[in-house]
């Protein structure tokens, strides 16, 4: 039973990392709102650490330690994957918007403009995703 709860905790951390980088309400599920996010985090944390304590009591500290390291590694890995994916997605969107603006204004869009637009788009995408994480996705 403890291993099942541990697996549920791992799935919850992957699910949370999937949505935490997105803006709310446009890209997140409605239930994962900025006000509900702390409750989800609390439930996930209680389940995770309660399960780790249960593994420690039922088995030993080594088992609980290895389970914690696996949880920590999965948490970091999934956050990085979703964070980087969202940055790439937003950077492409911002760059496309810059190109469309240049076409609307009938201005030439050469390699220097493309490089500057790509750099600016990447910076804007990072700022947007970091703001989503810090503010719960409010915009």
Image (cartoon, rainbow, N blue to C red):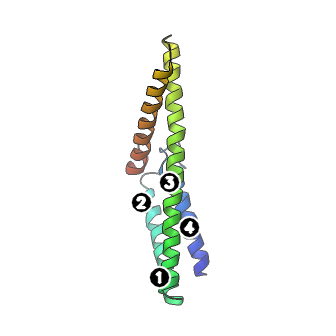
Distance (Cα) linking label 1 and label 3: 27 Å
Residue 39: percent from left, percent from top: 44, 62
Q: Nearer the viewer, residue 38 or 13?
A: 13
First along the sequence among labels 1 and 4: 4
Residue 121: percent from left, percent from top: 46, 32
Foreground disc of the pair 3, 4: 3
Q: Is residue 26 visible?
A: no
* Circle on res. 10: 4
Q: Is residue 12 visible?
A: yes
Crowding near the residue tagged with mark 2, few <14, some 14–19, many ≥20 C-alpha atoms within 10 Å: few
First along the sequence among labels 2 and 1: 2
Quarter containing the C terminus: top left
Q: Nearer the viewer, residue 15 or 38?
A: 15
The residue drawn where x is 61% and y is 76% is 4
* Image label count: 4
* Circle on res. 38: 2
Residue 128: percent from left, percent from top: 42, 40
Residue 110: percent from left, percent from top: 50, 18
First along the sequence among labels 3 and 4: 4
Distance (Cα) linking label 3 and label 4: 15 Å
Which secondary structure, mark 3? helix
Distance (Cα) linking label 1 and label 4: 15 Å
CB atoms of marks 2 and 1 within 8 Å: no
* Circle on res. 80: 3
The residue drawn where x is 38% and y is 50% is 134
Location of residue 124 by image quarter: top left
Look at mark 1 in the image and give the residue it sits on. 53
The vertical placement of 51 against 21, above or below, is: below
Quarter containing the N terminus: bottom right
């Amino acid at each position: 039973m403890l291993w099942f709860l541990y697996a549920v905790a791992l799935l919850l951390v992957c699910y949370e990392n999937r949505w935490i980088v997105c803006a709310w309400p446009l890209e997140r599920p409605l239930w994962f709102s900025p006000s509900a996010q702390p409750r989800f985090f609390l439930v996930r944390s209680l389940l995770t650490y309660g399960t780790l304590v249960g593994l420690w009591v039922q088995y030993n500290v080594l088992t609980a330690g290895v389970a914690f390291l696996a949880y920590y590694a999965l948490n970091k890995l999934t956050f990085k994957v979703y964070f980087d994916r969202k940055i790439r997605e937003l950077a492409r969107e911002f760059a496309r918007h810059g190109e469309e603006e240049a076409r609307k204004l009938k201005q030439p869009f050469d390699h220097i403009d493309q490089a500057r637009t790509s750099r600016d788009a990447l910076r804007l995408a990072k700022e947007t995703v970091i703001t989503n994480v810090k503010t719960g996705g409010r915009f």
